[in-house]
Amino acid sequence: LRTAAAMYQQLADKEPEKKEYHIGFADAVRRLGNPDAALVAYDKALARDGSYAPALEGKALALMQRGDLDASKALLDQLVSGGKAGWRSY
């Protein structure tokens, strides 16, 4: 996961407009136990597309990991009610 995070970070630095690279980095660092770094990357992706479901879902998981259950639930509810929820949202 550390290698994946480093590679996604390099890609995001080269092409910051690609939200997929920010999501890849965020997912990797979240799984490595760093939800704060993940939240920064998810927010970068959301700055480009505020309704991007993978970023919203990942952000909700990072918030949950940090213990911010109310904010996490609000994002997950938004995804479910908007019909954009992935399996992790449920």
Image (spheres, helix red, strand yellow):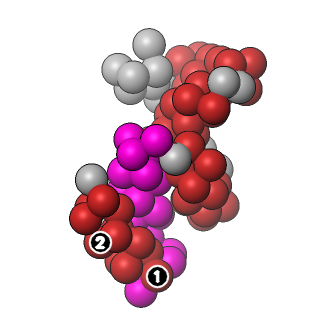
Expressed as whole percent of the image width and height from the top left, the position of residue 69 reads 68, 19
| Residue at image location 61% in from the left, 62% down from the top | 44
Are the residues flagged by discs 1 and 2 in contact, CB closer than 8 Å?
no
Q: Is residue 86 left or right of residue 17?
A: left
Residue that mark 2 sits on: 7
Residue 29 appears left or right of 34: left
Part of the protein shown in magenta: 14-33
Identify whether 57 is placed above or below 12. above
Give the numbered dot on residue 13. Answer: 1
Q: Please, is residue 51 above or below residue 64 in the view? A: below
Q: Residue at x 56, y 29 (%)?
A: 65
Q: Which mark is residue 43?
A: none
Residue at image location 38% in from the left, 41% down from the top: 31
- Which of the image's four quarters has the C terminus? top left
- Using the rendered view, name the quadrant where residue 30 is placed: top left
Q: Say which amino acid is labelled 2.
A: Met
Q: Is residue 34 left or right of residue 50?
A: left
Among the 4 quarters of the image, the one containing residue 62? top right
- Residue 30: in sight, yes or no? yes
| Rendered image quadrant of residue 75 | top right
